[in-house]
Structure formats: structure tokens, C-alpha cells
Amino acid sequence: MEVILRYLQQILSTPAIFVGLIAMLGLILKKADSQSIIKGTIKTILGFIVLGAGAGVVQQSIVPFGDLFQMAFNMHGVVPNNEAIDRKSSAVLRLRCQTST
């Protein structure tokens, strides 16, 4: 039983799969046909993965600009970006979920 719970926790702690399952539930409740349910779930999972990858690229590309501005203008601060914050927070939350077991 504990193995099953650990497996479910690992699946649900992956944001893309969790959002895909929510989309699947919505399509099932909407009484969509099975082809639409499968397509909608896969599109949601892949879209979430692409969004996360894009946020990682944006986050990594902003860091050098922050260092450049800090060096050029002697300014200290952060460059706010929603996608970068989302990517970082999901990584931290995933780490916390995995270490809590």
C-alpha cells in the first residue's frame, strides 16, 4: 500500500501531469468523447512542459542582464519576471514534496 501511495505522490508532484489530470477530469465531466479526452489531456501536459521549458530559458537569459546592470550602474535588485518566478517556485515546491517523504 505504501508503494502505491509513494508512486501516486510522485506522479501528482509533477506539475504537468497534475494539470493534465485536472484537464482530463474536466473533459470527462463535460462528457466529451474519448478521442477528445485523450487529445486534450496530452495537449495540456505538453503545453505545460513547453511553458516550463520556456520559463527556464527566460530565467537563464535574464541573469546575465542583472549582473550587467549591477556592474554598469552599481545598482542592486532583481529583474521581475512571472515565468522565472513560476519556474523557480515549482522547482522548490517539487524539491520540498520529494524530501517530505
Image (spheres, rainbow, N blue to C red):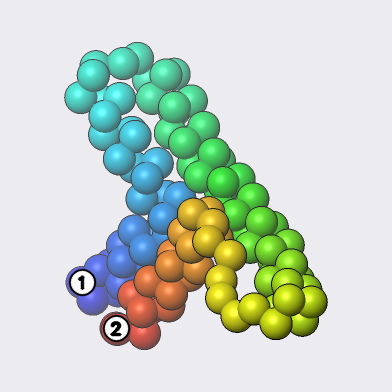
Query: Residue at horizontal 58%, vertical 65%?
Result: 79
Q: Which residue position holds label 2?
A: 101
Q: CA distance from mark 1 to mark 2?
A: 15 Å
Can residue 94 be seen? Answer: no
The x, y position of residue 57, in whole percent, is 69, 57
SS category of the residue bearing label 2: loop
The amino acid at mark 2 is Thr
**Which comes before the other along the chain, label 1 or label 2?**
1
Element type where label 1 sits in the image: loop
Q: Report which quarter residue 10 is drawn in.
A: bottom left
In-image side of 19 versus 49 (left or right):
left
Q: Which mark is residue 83?
A: none
52 and 67: which one is in front?
Answer: 67
Front-lying residue, 9 or 79: 79
Residue sitting at x 34%, y 34% = 23
The location of residue 88, given as percent across then percent down, is: 50, 68
Label 2 crowd bin: few (<14), some (14–19), many (20+), radius 10 Å? few
Q: Residue at x 33, y 33 (%)?
A: 24
Q: Nearer the viewer, mark 1 or mark 2?
A: 2
The quarter of the picture where the N terminus appears is bottom left
Mark 1 surroundings within 10 Å by alpha-carbon count, few (fewer than 14), some (14 through 19), many (20 or more): few
Nearest to the observer: residue 47 or residue 54: 54
Q: Which residue is mark 1?
A: 1
- Which amino acid, mark 1? Met
Outermost residue toward the front?
Answer: 73
Kindly tell me whether residue 16 is visible in this rendering.
Answer: yes
Give above or below for 68 relative to 22: below
Quadrant occupied by the C terminus: bottom left
Is residue 92 found left or right of 1 in the rendered image? right
**Image-quadrant location for residue 19:** top left
